[in-house]
Image (cartoon, helix red, strand yellow):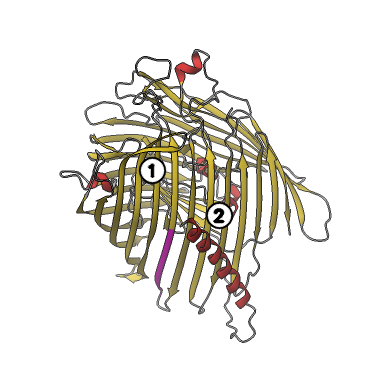
């Protein structure tokens, strides 16, 4: 089956290359399309909404696509299982969003989060993204936009793929822990058909005593054209294959008594592999009367196997508590709609109507294993999950100093679960439907004295795992009510710093949580979250630029208990200096404050502060073709001992007579130096 995914990825690459060749077919008619260049700030509906261009994250350390997310105020991503390869753990607005349950991710509008995933609801693995192919990030907080549905509670992020690269690039990089990265990116055609081809290879052993042996390969092909002067069509295909070993989550007591190194592993057989092929089509047609018809479609093939052992020897003192989670799925969907702009009652306005749909056809399995050898089956399910989401949006500007934007989004879900294991103790099965209607409202006032003010309300949701949704009396869709007021200001002029301040709140109704690691359902109560964000970005003076933010949040169940793992204080800061001789330097810091690990806050995770240094230098060497650039990254510059994912739960070492509740952590990487050379041609 994986060969099918490989051929889908390669076939899309060939298709894009073939379309590039058609651009030079002399038998095709020539159509002159005038080019217009417009530069302006992107209109936003909330103070926390941002577009982050590629120039702001080109200085991020390479190898882990989630690194770019730190540029979004309050969003922190950390490794989850002692070794790269698995999806990151995401923190935003008082949510430990696990692998993506409450943060929606997209690539050119295609959903990345996976519903009813074998490991965790909303699982969002970003490792199929090649960062250099992204022209920018659209970052949204709250649930104020009708375009986003499932998993859009704390926020949403859309990765925008560039159409072409101005220069082709060949890059080679290497560093400590046997780390290597190779990248090829070029645009064979840039006119009638605009093409982008990219290939990435990455390998690292990490700092672990048992080599990570993480290998990742990525391919991307994209072709964009204008079938008519008023329309645009884009086809994109990607292919990813990864495999890795992992050290798991380290019990603190074993490190403290000296029986286990910080980067050691009790069960070195942990790890996994994944294959992901995607194809997407984006089309729009602009009418002479100011309207736009749009239609987008996507399809994905996905394969995933994960071997973990969290509780060690708690349940099985002989073989250990190793589990295997497997996911095989085909996912497809898209959206269609129409937007009309014009003047109504002498007011600038725009109305949009659309329909989104998505289908996930899944085979998910949970079983026991030791050293990756299967022992038994806990849950084995076929899942067919579909959603249909009509929406309507209206934008009106009644006065030059006021904009109003809002709309309604409706959700209809169908869940169908079939049990493939009649002898299993846990046998989730059944069929159910569920729906929601979600209002959105945004008010934008100003600008006055280079300052705009925002007030926002929106209802969002995340779906629960289908295996929980079909349980009688369950809540398949967890509604979230989100609120926000804020301002954006450029007090020192258009070229100076932009300052953003936001107060926000999120109320999430009672929900069920399917625990993929145990195959069980937990009842979780209603929650409330409140917080504030302050951010600044832009030019300080001359060649010196700054980007930074501080966020504070308070998260609790409505009965007053703390929400385990919820972040309270986070911070990010970066100084960028563009030297006059082709050198660009960046010093950045990321901070995560103390977090409660239990409802009664009796156990907490320590805070950490991590510094990174990045250098890029345009080498002044004359080449017959192209130019050279050298780069250097130093991660964890001060070699700080810090912890990434941290949990408190019961486990048992082989030498112990009973289980012990303890802190379990994934060690943060020590200082790592990585450098390389890029040839632009």
Distance of mark 1 from mark 2, alpha carbons? 29 Å
Q: Quadrant of the C terminus?
A: bottom right
Q: Who's the residue at 74% across and 49% down the image? A: 629
Q: Nearer the viewer, residue 263 or 90?
A: 263
Farthest left residue?
473
Task: List x then y, in percent, for residue 86.
Answer: 48, 41
Image point (35%, 56%), residue name: 402
Q: Which quadrant would residue 545 be assigned to in this image?
A: top right
Q: Which residue corresponds to the image point at 26% horizontal and 41% vertical from the top-left?
A: 424
Estimate how packed mark 1 is, as few (under 14), some (14 to 19) or many (20 or more) residues with alpha carbons within 10 Å: many
| Residue beneath the point at 37% across and 23% down | 317
Coordinates of residue 572 in the picture (x, y in percent): 52, 35
Marker disc for residue 431: none
Q: Which residue in the protein does label 1 denote?
A: 486
Outermost residue toward the top in this view: 257
Vertical relation: 84 (above or below) 237: above
Relative to 646, say whether 344 is above or below.
below
Is 633 on the left or on the right of 268, as rendered? right
Mark 1 lies on a secondary structure that is strand
Q: Name the dominant secondary structure of the magenta segment.
A: strand
Q: Earlier in the sequence, mark 1 or mark 2?
A: 2
- Where, quadrant-wise, is the N terminus in this rendering? bottom left
Could you tell whether 96 is left or right of 512 in the image? right
What is the count of numbered marks? Answer: 2
Identify residue for label 2: 134
Whether 645 is among the magenta residues is no
Q: Quadrant of residue 68?
A: top right
- Magenta span of residues: 290-300
């Amino acid at each position: 089956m994986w060969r099918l995914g490989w051929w889908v990825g390669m076939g899309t690459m060939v298709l894009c290359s073939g379309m590039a060749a058609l651009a030079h077919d002399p038998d095709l008619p020539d159509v002159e399309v005038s080019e217009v260049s417009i530069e302006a700030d992107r209109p936003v509906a909330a103070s926390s909404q941002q577009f982050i261009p590629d120039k702001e994250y080109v200085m991020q350390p390479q190898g882990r696509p989630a690194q770019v997310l730190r540029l979004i105020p309050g969003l922190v991503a950390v490794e989850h299982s002692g070794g790269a390869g698995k999806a990151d753990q995401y923190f935003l607005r008082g949510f430990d969003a696990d692998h993506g349950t409450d943060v929606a991710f997209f690539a050119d509008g295609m959903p990345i989060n996976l519903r009813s995933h074998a490991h965790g609801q909303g699982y969002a693995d970003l490792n199929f993204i090649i960062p250099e192919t992204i022209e920018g990030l659209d970052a949204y907080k709250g649930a104020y936009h009708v375009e986003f549905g499932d998993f859009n509670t704390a926020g949403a992020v859309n990765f925008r793929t560039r159409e072409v690269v101005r220069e082709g690039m060949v890059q080679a990089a290497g560093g400590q822990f046997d780390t290597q990265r190779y990248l090829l990116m070029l645009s064979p055609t840039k006119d009638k058909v605009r093409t982008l081809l990219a290939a990435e290879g990455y390998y690292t052993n990490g700092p672990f005593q048992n080599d990570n042996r993480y290998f990742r390969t990525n391919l991307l092909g994209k072709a964009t054209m204008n079938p008519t002067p008023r329309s645009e069509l884009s086809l994109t295909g990607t292919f990813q294959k990864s495999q890795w070993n992992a050290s798991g989550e380290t019990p603190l007591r074993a490190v403290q008594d000296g029986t286990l190194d910080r980067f050691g592993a009790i069960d070195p057989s942990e790890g996994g592999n994944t294959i992901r092929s995607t194809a997407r089509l984006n089309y729009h047609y602009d009418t002479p009367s100011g309207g736009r018809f749009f239609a987008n479609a996507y399809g994905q093939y996905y394969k995933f196997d994960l071997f973990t052992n969290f509780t060690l020897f708690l349940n099985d003192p002989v073989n250990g508590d190793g589990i295997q989670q497997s996911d095989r799925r085909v996912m497809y969907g898209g959206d269609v709609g129409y937007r009309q702009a014009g003047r109504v009652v002498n007011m600038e306005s725009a109305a949009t109507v659309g329909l989104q749909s998505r289908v996930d056809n899944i085979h998910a399995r949970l079983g026991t294993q030791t050293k990756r050898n299967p022992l038994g089956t806990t849950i084995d399910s076929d899942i067919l999950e579909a959603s249909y989401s009509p929406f309507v949006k209206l934008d009106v500007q009644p006065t030059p100093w006021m904009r109003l934007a809002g709309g309604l989004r409706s959700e209809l879900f169908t869940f169908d679960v079939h049990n493939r294991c009649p002898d299993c103790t846990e046998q989730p099965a059944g069929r159910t439907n569920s729906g929601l209607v979600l209002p959105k409202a945004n008010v934008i006032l100003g600008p006055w004295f280079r300052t705009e003010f925002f007030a926002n309300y929106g209802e969002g949701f995340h779906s629960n795992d289908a295996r929980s949704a079909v349980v009688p009396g369950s809540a398949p869709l967890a509604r979230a009510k989100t609120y926000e007021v804020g301002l954006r200001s450029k007090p020192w002029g258009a070229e100076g710093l932009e300052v953003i301040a936001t107060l926000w709140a999120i109320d999430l109704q009672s929900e069920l949580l399917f625990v993929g690691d145990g195959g069980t359902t937990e009842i979780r109560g209603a929650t409330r979250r409140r917080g504030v964000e302050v951010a600044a970005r832009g030019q300080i003076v001359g060649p010196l630029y700054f980007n930074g933010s501080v966020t504070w949040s308070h998260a609790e169940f409505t009965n007053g208990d703390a929400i385990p793992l919820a972040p309270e204080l986070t911070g990010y800061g970066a100084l960028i200096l563009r030297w006059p001789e082709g050198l660009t330097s960046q010093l950045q810091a990321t901070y995560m404050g103390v977090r409660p690990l239990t409802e009664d806050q009796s156990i907490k995770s320590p805070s950490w502060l991590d510094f990174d240094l990045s250098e890029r230098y345009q080498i002044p060497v004359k080449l017959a073709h192209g130019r050279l650039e050298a780069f250097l990254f130093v991660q964890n510059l001060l070699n700080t001992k810090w912890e990434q994912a941290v949990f408190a739960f019961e486990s048992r070492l082989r030498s112990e007579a009973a289980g012990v509740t303890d802190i379990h952590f994934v060690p943060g990487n020590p200082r790592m130096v990585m450098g390389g050379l890029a040839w632009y041609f």
